[in-house]
Image (cartoon, grey):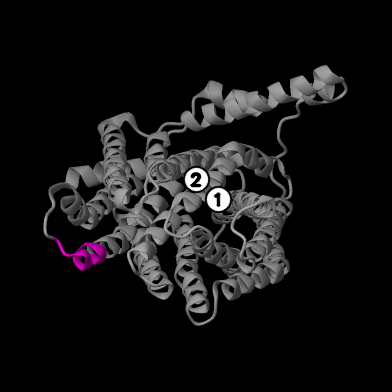
Amino acid sequence: MAESCDHENEDDALLRSKHDALHVEGAVGPTTEHARACRALLASHFLSTWGQRGWEFTVGLIMLELQPNSLRLVAVWGLVDAAAAVAFGGALGRYVDGCLSRVQAASQMYVLQNAMLVISAVASLLLLWSDVRSGPAFWAALLVMMGAGAASTLGALGSTLSVEREWTKTLCGSDSAALAALNAAMRRIDLSCLIASPIMAGLDMQYGSLSAAVLLLLAWNLCSWFPEVLLLRYAQRCSPALAADKPAPAADSSSSSSSSSGGGGICRRIARSLDQQLQSWTLYACQPAAPAAAALALLYLTVLSWGTLMTAYLKTLGLPEADLAVWRGLGAASGILATLTFPPLHRRLGLVATATLSIWLQLACLLAAVVPSVAAAALGAGIRPLVRRYALVCGLVLSRFGLWSFDLAVTQLMQETCQHASLGAVNGVQGSVQSLFQMLAFGAGVLLPATDSFVWLMAGSCGVVALAAALCTAFALRTSCGAGLGSPLPEAQEEWSEA
C-alpha cells in the first residue's frame, strides 16, 4: 500500500511539473487581491447556478404535470437537452478559446443562459395555465419551451468552460493545491445551490403552486445577469492574470478565402466546421487523462442520479415534491462533504488514487441502493415497498460523495495536463461526450417509459458504473507502472494550433 501511494505521489509530481511547463500566465500567490478575485468568481458562480439548478428540478415536474403517469415526455426533454450539448459542445469550447477577452466570453454565455431560461419559463407558464393538452398551439409552446431550455443549458455549459475551467486555472497559476481548493469551492457552491434552490422551488409548489415556482425562477434569471458580469469585472481588476488577454489563436487564411467565394465558399465553410469538430475530438482523445475523462463521461449513462427521470419516478412512488427536494438536498450535502475532503485527499494520495478510490465507493453505494428493488422484481422477494424506496434514496444520497470526489479529481487532471490554449475545446468535447451518454440514458427512458420497467434501467446503470470503475482502475495501474501521464500527441496539438 505504501509503495502504491509513493507511485501516486510521483504521478502527482509529474502533473505539477507538466502544468508548470504549460501554464502561460504564471503563478499567482495567495495575496489579498487573489482572495478578492476568488470571492468575486464564487459569487458570480452562485448567482448563475441558483437559477439553473432550480430550473433543472422544476422542468421535470412540469413535464410530468403535462403528461401524468408516464415518463415519456420527461425523457424526450432530456434527449433534446442532451442532444444540443452533443451537437454544440465542441463549438462552444472553440469559441471560448478564441475570445481574447475573458469577460466577453463569460458574459455572452450568461446572456444565453439567462435569456433562454426566461423564454422557456414563459412558455411553460402558458402550458400550465392552459387546460388544453393537445393541438398545434400546445405542441408549438412545448417546442419553444424545450428549445429555449436546451439553449439555456448550452449557455450554462459555456459559462462552465469559461469561468469554472479557464478562469480558475488562470487565477491559480501553477499552484496545484490552490487550484484544488478553488475547484472544490466552485463545486461546493454548485451543490449548495442543488440543495437550496430545489427546496425553495419544492416549497413553492407544495404551499403555493407549480406556476409560482416557475415565476420565482423567471424573476431570478431576469435580475441576476448584471451582477454576475459586474462580479467578473471586479475579479479581473483584482487579478492581473485575469485582466490580461488570452493568447491570440493562430490566424487562418482559409477562412478569408472561403468567405470571399460564393456557393462553393459555403460548402468549404461547412467542410471546415466539420474538420474543426473532428480535430477537437481527436485532440480530446489524445489527452493524457483521456481514459479517466471517459470513465467520468460513462457516469452520465445512468438513471441513478437526482435528474429529471429519477425525480419523476420517485414522485410516482408517492414522494411529495417537498420530500423530493429534501432528499435531493441531502444528496448534494453528501457531495459538499466530498468537496471538503477532496483537497486533503489530493495532497495525501494524489489525483489518480483519489479518483480510483472515489469511483469504487460510488459503485458500492449504488449497489446497496438497487439490489433490493432488483431482487423484488426478478426473484419476487418479499421486500416491503417502503424498504425498497428508502434503500434507493439513501443509497443515492451516499453515492454522491464518491461521485463528486471522482468528478473533482478528473476535472483537475484535465486542467493540469491540457494545453492552456485548447482547454475550452477539450472540456467542450468532454461536455459533449457526457451529454451523449446522458442522451442515451434518456433514450432508454423513451423506450421503456413504464414506471414498472424503471428497475431494469437502474440495474443497467449499475453495470455502467462498474465499467467506469474498471476503466479508471486500468488507467491508475498504467500510470503507477511507470507509463506516467505524458502529454498530448505532438501531431494532434500541431493540427489544433493550425486550425
| Tags 2 and 1 touching, CB below 8 Å | yes
Q: Earlier in the sequence, mark 2 or mark 1?
A: 1
Identify the secondary structure beneath mark 2.
helix
Image quadrant where residue 492 sits: top right
Give the magenta part as a residue range.
Answer: 383-390
Mark 2 is surrounded, within 10 Å at the Cα level, by few (under 14), some (14 to 19) or many (20 or more) other residues, namely many
Residue 5: percent from left, percent from top = 23, 47
Image coordinates of residue 199 in percent, x first then y, are: 46, 74
Magenta stretch, main secondary structure, is helix
Tell me the SS state at disc 1: helix
- Is residue 59 found inside the magenta-colored segment of the image? no
Q: What residue is drawn where x is 61% and y is 23%?
A: 495
Q: Amino acid at mark 2?
A: Gln
Q: Amino acid at mark 1?
A: Arg
Q: Is residue 167 above or below residue 62?
A: above
In the picture, the disc for residue 165 is 1
Image quarter of residue 223: bottom right
Q: Which residue is mark 2?
A: 415
